[in-house]
Amino acid sequence: MATSQTGPALPERLIPPRDGVGSADVEAEAVSRPAARLTADRKRQRSGDEARGRAMRAAISVIAEKGTAGMRMSDIAERAGMSTGHILYHFGKKDRLLLEVLAWSQADLWARFQEAADRAASPAEKLDVFVRHYLPRHQGDERYALWTQVLAQRHDAEGRHILTALLDGWDERLEAILREGRDVGQFADVDLPEFTIRAVAMLSGLSEDVMFGRSRWQHTSAHTFALSALERELRPPAEA
């Protein structure tokens, strides 16, 4: 890029050949230089993405273990194998850390959900995938513990906007599955917004049970219970 110090940049095809170097050689070199720069840029981006992911995973782990009050940026840095300055580079101010980490965590989880949903052969299988990704995997699930920590904080208008968008993201994904199942005749013709509200409320309640470690989920599956309850309501009248 040209600057006031360097003057305007010439198109590479207009740069005169150096002594002893033909124009064809220069053109070949001009083609290879952008390709080399692009490769280097991609490598730096991958490296930056990997470092950010490592920092985010470390933050999730520290928050789940120590809570927001006992968490220090140095704890995250130590767990991620980075310097505290590097962590500050990724997160900025500490008061925005929770939202940053939660947004990253949800984007990562939704990517995993979408990969699994794309492999599903039917809306019923997609519903199974949704329930599996919504519920915590076990008591103390770090992703769900992060949600609990974030929702317990006081947030400004921007923070509430971010949280609302993340919560709405789950509703939108479920409603899309329900609509697809209804349109192909696999699900009953339910009121989609109303059913979605009830379904997510049930899943949230079950999630709290699992995270608390209630004994009734020690010998049965919350996933199986939730999926069975949803499928009963969604069964078309002819199959009821």
Image: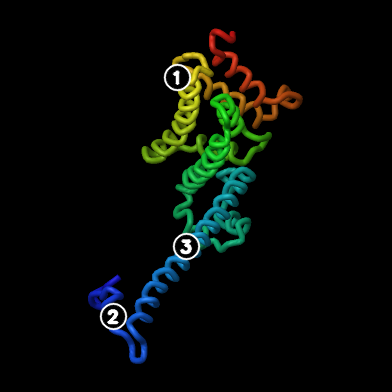
Residue 48 in the image: above or below residue 206: below
- What's the residue type where badge 1 is placed? Leu
Whole-percent x, y for residue 73 in the image: 55, 55
For the residue labelled by badge 2, is the local secondary structure a helix, a strand or a loop? loop
Relative to 181, is 136 above or below? below
Left or right, 108 with reference to 15 = right
Residue 71, how many percent across, how many down? 58, 49
What residue is rendered at 23% in x and 77% in y? 7
Disc number lying in front (2 or 3): 2
The percent position of residue 147, horizontal first and vertical second, equals: 54, 37
Q: Looking at the image, is mark 2 or mark 1 nearer the viewer? A: 2
Q: Nearer the viewer, residue 217 or 8?
A: 8
Mark 3–mark 1 distance (CA, rounded to whole Å):
42 Å
Q: CA distance from mark 2 to mark 1?
A: 63 Å
Q: Is residue 67 visible?
A: yes
Residue found 39% across the figure and 76% down from its top: 28
Residue on which disc 1 sits: 192
Q: Which mark is residue 42?
A: 3
Q: Secondary structure at mark 3?
A: helix
Tell me the kind of residue under disc 3.
Arg
